[in-house]
Amino acid sequence: MVDLQTSVGELKLKNPTMLASGILGETGELLMRVAESGAGAVVTKSIGLEPREGHPNPTVIEFEFGLLNAVGLANPGIEDFREQFQIAKKGEVPVIGSIFGKGAGEFVDLATKMEDYGASAVELNLSCPHAEGLGQEIGAEPKNVELITKEVKGSVSIPVFPKLTPNVKDIVALADAASKGGADAVVAINSVRAMAISPETKMPILANKIGGLSGTAIRPIGVRCVYEIWREVSIPIIGVGGISSGMDALQYLMAGASAVQIGSGVWIGGPGVFSNVCKEIEEFLEENGHKSVKEVIGAAHSC
């Protein structure tokens, strides 16, 4: 029997899969459904201090190799999210609260609220590529990542996971800044800044023009980012981007991730993707003589 249990810092998981923020994460019922479908943990939709409508439609385009979205951090606000969070906890897996803000003060206020709600950890969205004055516009600067992480760490006792943007010259510098700020782990990566144009209308398809690309197309970018971070910064990593199978997840684990998040894979394959990914990981490990998933974490660095 292969042991799929893993840990990200102090956070213990029954298996290495998590629901990524932004997919099925706005209501407690959906989060609970994902937990019951086999995810080792769930991450909420990114929540701000106040309700936010986000960008007008169209906000999502589906491609053969991924999704392009510019939802714009639409959310109900932290106060109205309390009830949904309590429902999500009934799924009996760790619930990680994703938050966004305009600066350290807002992140601190949101993190303390999430801790009060019973969050097992808090994920700092420092990487959304399509929200003005938020996300990567803040998180592309290492000094901001370090400051916000440090302020949040000083205000809560639960683990803090900054989510990093790949839309920079050097993501390792961001991971290093997060580590210096006291992060318990980093999440890599968020979506890649991108756009699509309709030849018929001669116009961008998304109402916001620019969005974030996720799914299969960005998996090689995510794997590379995790590999580089693991090599240079001594901090646990949660890998994200284009995972829909056990072999996809194993790429991230062998690059150095202690766990992985699945987003677009849920959009395409439904919540059953978590149990499928875990089954495929278990079969691979057993066939190759491994007794624990922990044995392959960082394995690609030994060659």
Image (cartoon, rainbow, N blue to C red):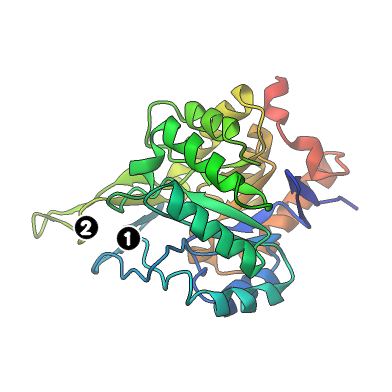
Residue bearing mark 1: 72
Of all residues, the one furthest to the right in this rendering is 1
Q: Position of residue 229 (x, y in %)?
A: 57, 29
Does 176 appear above or below 44? above
Which is in the foreground here, disc 2 or disc 1?
1
- Count of labels in the image: 2
Of all residues, the one furthest to the top in this rendering is 303
Marks 2 and 1 close (CB-CB < 8 Å): yes
Residue 208 shows which numbered tag? 2
Judging from the image, what secondary structure is the residue with disc 2 in?
Answer: loop
Residue 119, image quadrant: bottom right
Which of the two residues, 56 or 143, is positioned nearer the viewer here?
143
The 10 Å Cα crowd at callout 2, few under 14, some 14 to 19, many 20 or more, is many
- Decide if residue 188 is in sight here: no
Q: Position of residue 40 (x, y in %)?
A: 71, 60
- Decide if residue 83 is in sight here: yes
